[in-house]
Amino acid sequence: MLTLPLIILIALLVLYPAVYSIHLATLNKSMQKFVGFGNFTFLFKRDTFWMVVKQSCIFAVTAVFFKALIGFIVAHFVHNIPGKKQRKWRGMLLVPWVIPPAMSTLAWLWLFDPSYSAFNYTLSFFGIGPVNWLGDTAWARFSVILVNVWYGAPFFLIMYLAALKSVPEQLYEAAAIDGANWWQRIWYVTLPMMRNIIAITTLFSLIVTFANFDIVRILTSGGPLDRTHIFATWAFKVGIEGSDIPLGASVSLFMVPILAIAAIFILRDVNKRGNEA
Amino acid sequence: MSTLAIDKSGPTRKVKLGSMSRDRTWALRWSYFFLVLFAIFFLTPPLYMLITSLKSSAEISAATNPWWVFHPTLSNYVELLTSNQFLRFFWNSSMVAIMVVIVTMLISVPAAFALARMKFWGSATLATGVFLTYLIPDSLLFIPLFKMLATVQEWTGITLLNRWYVLLFIYPTLTVPFCTWIMIGYFASIPKELDEAALIDGASWLQTLTRIFIPVALPGLIAATIFAFTVSWAQFLYPLVFTTSVDQLVLPVGIITSLIKGDVFNWGQIMTGALLGAAPPLIIYAFLMDYYIAGLTAGATKG
């Protein structure tokens, strides 16, 4: 009885739309005729679609990798800081995650501004630039990933910090007595102890990054020439701005396989640990 | 030659003996050094927001040093905080966020209570299902939801699209699963003896929930509330798709669509708006950091 509102909410506004989008994907643009896999075969023939697939994968994998790496490194540094100061540093370093991404991306957009703004001004002292941050394909991709890393790394930092704290100190002492250097300590003690958290955080972040919309939308809107579009932004462009709802639905459906794989792994992990407890 | 030989054999032991604490201080110094670097990376955009928000348009377009304010002015703040349009965005955002928090709590706390304590047919499956829905991103659902709302609007004649209150139905799909999930974790960690004692004393389920579970799991409840608030405050895609008229917009969409006029970027105002938009979550975070972090890590560690 108590779960009824929950069930209704999920069924009506999550499950139904999910199924409905499959139905939508089989209609023609005016949504009056059934076209079967017509939208999909149409997409397969378009270069832009394959570009979006490629870009989404590059975007998600690179961003998640650097988020995880930076999070891991910074977590170690924060972990080294004693007591009260650690709290302060942790508080400061989590700020990017707290600011709504739409707001902070605006700040980045302004930092990237080619003519008036900060990055090119600073770089000009080193005799570099001006760099066309968002207008040049390679730089635009770099910028989009950079902002995503900036936004997501603190999440990894916090997760890893929590995990680091749960590694018993004795293990490091034992390793030190056995003459392990810092690299061996990380490789043989820290990483195995943190494996679960690393796996689950990475998978989770993979889902979120893959489905990201705000950052790309605000920074480049997919430009220059669709070179930074990812699934979500392209689906928005095709489906809402181009008012071809079925085609947009088909585009966003292509996120499902990757999301499903990541979700299955997360679920396995969560259940496994549920059983251990 | 001889000194070299001595260096090689002699001091190695000495260094080993005194190395523990020296290693530590050096590790600490390096940690601080790198943390400062990373802090610069992490804090540049928000600080730059603040710097720009204190500048007049004239100073911004004068192309002076962008990292410094030469003539600080609050005119951007005054202008925005007296503009009806901006206050309208702020009001819409607050209304949506606060009401979504209430709706979320009303749905997820009883559900979490039931899932954590009452074993009924399908309860385990439902708990897993709740977690799975948390993993479904907004960018997968916005197109079918848009079409659904349009269809419902056609059938019933109730205007749903382009009204801020439609967000009250949509946002809970993002907040409820996670809040239910972490509340299940908190409720499950309450010892069974506690509610058994309450039952023996003749408490109904409702009384057990309000008198025992909610007070004991208050930290979890606060964490869930903060989560629900920040998610609804920051959500960008749904309001961008579902609302278009200026008076119906929430803050993130409002700033982007109304302060950017064509190709004219009034950066002083945009940054001020962004900073004001980022303020509520930042203030909550500043005061309730521990709850915030508890909620953040709970998703993965409480499972």
Image: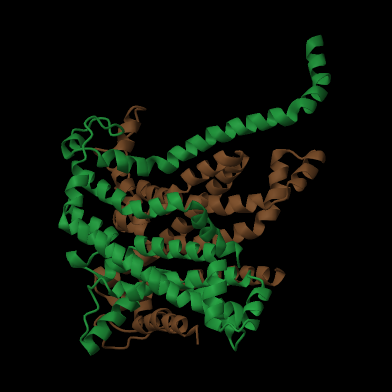
Is residue A173 in view? yes
Q: Could you tell me residue B43's position as x and y percent?
A: 41, 42
Q: Is residue B104 above or below residue B60?
A: below
Image quarter of residue B85: bottom left
Q: Could you tell me residue B163's position as x and y percent?
A: 23, 73
Residue B126 appears left or right of B234: right
Q: Could you tell me residue B253's position as x and y percent?
A: 26, 60
**In this view, which residue lies farthest toward the top?**
B2
Residue B250 appears left or right of A228: left
Q: Is residue A195 above or below residue B211?
A: above
Pick the front one: A271 or B293: B293
**Which quadrant: the C terminus of chain B?**
bottom right
Q: Could you tell me residue B171's position as x and y percent?
A: 37, 71
Residue A133 appears left or right of A7: left
**Which quadrant: the N terminus of chain B?**
top right
Pick the front one: A178 or A142: A178
- Colour of the chain lettered A: brown
Residue A83 appears left or right of A155: right
**Which residue sits at x=64%, y=29%?**
B26
**Which residue sits at x=42%, y=70%?**
B174
**Which residue sits at x=21%, y=37%?**
B73
Pick the front one: A226 or A217: A217
- Colour of the chain lettered B: green
Is residue A220 in view? no
Image quarter of residue A221: bottom left
